[in-house]
Amino acid sequence: MVGLEEAKSCHRFSPCGGSWIPRDLEDAAMIDGLSRFGAFIKVVMPISIAGILTAVIFAFTLVTQEFVYGVTFIPALSSYTVSVGVPCTGMSISGAR
């Protein structure tokens, strides 16, 4: 089960409001003639891409691990957790047609 510690590790790598990007970069872009949105798109987003991708990869890995764990170690279809039971039930129903 994905717990609080995994969520904290994903949050640690997320941009979380841009508090780790110096405000001076955005101010310098606005002095150069960009709007606040333009500064966000052209300055803040390229810097934030690595953190955003890291958070996405960690979240995908945690969800995938939970699914594989449930499919591997829970033998009965009636005992599956929701994250495993919904996709597996959908596959068995659509396969019966």
Image: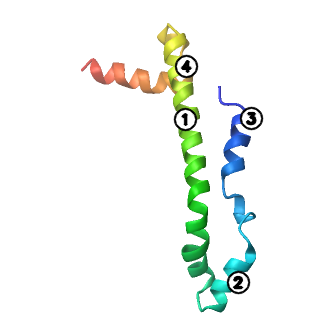
If the image is split into quadrants, where does the C terminus sit? top left
**Above or below, 51 relative to 94:** below
Side (left or right) of 65 relative to 6: left
Q: Are marks 4 and 1 in contact (CB under 8 Å)?
A: no
Q: Where residue 36 sits: x, y (%)?
A: 63, 82
What is the quadrant of residue 57 in the picture? top right
Colouring convention used in this rendered image of the protein: rainbow
Q: Amino acid at mark 1?
A: Thr
Mark drawn on residue 61: 1
Q: Are marks 2 and 4 in contact (CB under 8 Å)?
A: no
Q: Are marks 1 and 3 in contact (CB under 8 Å)?
A: no
Query: Residue placed at 59% from the left, 75% from the top?
Result: 43
Question: Can you identify the residue that label 3 sits on?
Answer: 5
Q: Amino acid at mark 4?
A: Tyr
**Mark 4 vs mark 1, CA separation in Å:** 12 Å
**Above or below, 5 relative to 23:** above
Given the current orientation, which residue lies at the most extreme top position? 75
Q: Which type of secondary structure does the marked residue at label 2 adopt?
A: helix
Q: Earlier in the sequence, mark 4 or mark 1?
A: 1
Question: Can you identify the residue that label 2 sits on?
Answer: 27
Q: Earlier in the sequence, mark 2 or mark 4?
A: 2
Question: Can you identify the residue that label 4 sits on?
Answer: 69
Viewer-nearest residue: 76 or 53: 53
